[in-house]
Image (tube, rainbow, N blue to C red):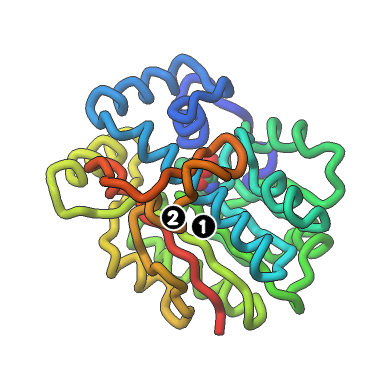
Amino acid sequence: MTEGLSIDPTKPSIARVYDYLLGGKDNYAVDREVGDVFKRDLPGSVAIAFANRAALTRAVREIATTTGVRQFIDLGSGLPTADNVHEVAQRHAPESRVIYVDTDPQVLVHGRALLERNEHTRVVAADVREPEAIRNHPDTVELIDFEQPVAVMFSAILHHVNDEEDPAAIVRYWKDQVPSGSYFFVSHFRSGNNAETAEAETVLQQTFGRGRWRTDEEILALLDGLEILEPGVVPASLWHPDEVTGTDGPWRGQAPRELTVWEHLIAATLARKP
Ligand code: SAM
């Protein structure tokens, strides 16, 4: 468990660099320096972050409006930004309950400040690689009814789990905890087996010691035993894209169009436990 860790403004954090790329203000000079290196060496970083966030938003809306699921566990939730999972879910289904989980102490501080008055939402400090601790955390036990379907959100988190840490076992743990009719959203760095992917992996590994670009087949393998819903594993911008009009919130969806080379580097998919 990570409760009690203090914020270190001298070391870049994944959550704060991501916040910087999304145009947020919850970051320090050290995060902006790294973010600027990403922007220079990996000019698609901002596009990847936006495409990811927009797909997450559409997935939450899809789950809230079409499945009847009213409880979400958002693993590696990141710093609060525009249209957080509980805001999207509760906009469509006000009774929705959300557990946010992150290791970054700043996520805890900001998350708790934002969510203070929302009785249907909690922020848990825990490591996604220790799923049992998350499952048995008092806030999870209080808010989530594991007899009812749950939406488990792995948005831009499994690529921060290296192969030797067994990301498939993490997904399997949650699959075994939730009942049939539960949903699993995954967005993930997507390998194109090309120069852009190789460069992106090098930059991430050099900075954080993690950041694994997986092929569509490798991403599918993480979801073994689950029913992959249409349109399968696709670039995040192509996962149920919105029409240009009728978008939901600030993460504007895009009508189907030619993607940039960078947008191919982030995948999204939604699966269901049969
Ligand atoms: N899920 C959000 C989204 O898709 O917009 C945020 C994604 S951000 C790229 C990744 C988040 O995962 C960061 O906030 C980081 O602190 C968190 N994270 C990284 N490794 C983690 C771990 N082992 N356990 C929990 N959180 C982790």
1 and 2 marks in contact (CB < 8 Å): yes
| Residue type at numbered disc 1 | Phe
Amino acid tagged 2: Ser
In what element is the residue under mark 2?
strand
- The residue at the far front in this view is 245
* Nearer to the camera, 157 or 131: 157
Quadrant hosting residue 217? bottom left
- Other residues around mark 2 within 10 Å, as few (<14) / some (14–19) / many (≥20): many
Q: Residue at x 22, y 27 (%)?
A: 41
Q: Toward which corner of the image does residue 37 lie, by quadrant? A: top left
Q: Nearer the viewer, residue 170 or 69?
A: 69
Residue ID at (35%, 46%)? 210
Q: Nearer the viewer, residue 209 or 214?
A: 214
- Mark 1, secondary structure of its residue: strand
Work out whether 53 lies above or below 269. Answer: above
Q: Which mark is residue 154?
A: 1
Q: Position of residue 174 (x, y in %)?
A: 58, 71
Horizontally, residue 150 falls left or right of residue 189, namely right
| Residue found at the far top of this picture | 29
10 Å crowding of disc 1: few (<14), some (14-19), many (20+) = many
Which disc, if any, is residue 48?
A: none
Whole-percent x and y of residue 135? 68, 65
The quarter in which the C terminus is drawn is bottom right
- Residue 65 higher or lower than 15, as above or below: below
C-alpha span from label 1 to label 2: 7 Å
Q: How many marks?
A: 2
Disc ID at residue 187: 2
Q: Residue 255: horizontal and vertical position, in percent?
A: 41, 47
Residue at 20% across, 53% down = 192
Is 211 displayed left or right of 192 in the figure? right
Q: Is mark 2 within 8 Å of ligand 1?
A: yes
The image position of residue 8, as x and y in percent, is 55, 25
